[in-house]
Amino acid sequence: MFFHAVKKFVHVYLINAAFFKAILQHFKILNELVFQLSIDFSSLNGNRALKWNRKKKKLNLIALTTLQDKSTKLEI
């Protein structure tokens, strides 16, 4: 009985450890992406990078890409 409880505890612990490791890896990738975006936007000209949309009351971040003719917009 005791060994069954220990086995079950270790099994649940390992599943939870793998789950939380996956979640932490996801947030690490997301954090790196946000950091990369902040570097990209900070390298742009200030009046081009930030534009306030009065109708939607949102701040638009506009990145001018070199690969396309169109600009890429991100809304917060």
Image (cartoon, grey):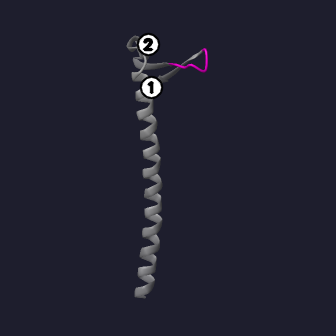
Residue 4 magenta: no
Counting other residues with Cα less than 10 Å from the Cα at mark 2, is it few (<14), some (14-19), or many (20 or more)? few
- Which residue occupies 40% across, 19% down? 59
> Residue shown at 44%/20% (left/top)?
61
Q: Is residue 64 left or right of residue 24?
A: right
* Residues tagged 2 and 1 counted as in contact (Cβ below 8 A): no
Quarter holding the C terminus is: top left
**Horizontal and vertical percent position of residue 72:** 54, 20
Q: Position of residue 62 (x, y in %)?
A: 47, 18
Query: What is the span of residues highlighted in magenta in the rendered image?
Result: 64-69
Residue with the mark numbered 1: 40
Identify the disc placed on residue 48: 2
Q: Nearer the viewer, mark 2 or mark 1?
A: 1
Q: Quadrant of residue 8?
A: bottom left
Question: Is 43 situated above or below 4?
Answer: above
Along the line of sight, the residue nearer the viewer: 35 or 12: 35
Where disc 2 sits, the SS reads helix
Identity, as a three-letter code, of the amino acid under mark 1: Asp
Residue 42 locus on image (x, y percent): 39, 22
Q: Quadrant of the N terminus?
A: bottom left
Give amino acid for label 2.
Arg
Q: Farthest right residue?
A: 68
Image coords of residue 40 (percent x, y): 45, 25
Q: Residues within 10 Å of mark 1 (few under 14, many from 20)?
A: few
Q: Majority secondary structure of the magenta segment?
A: loop
Mark 1 secondary-structure assignment: helix
Q: Quadrant of residue 45?
A: top left
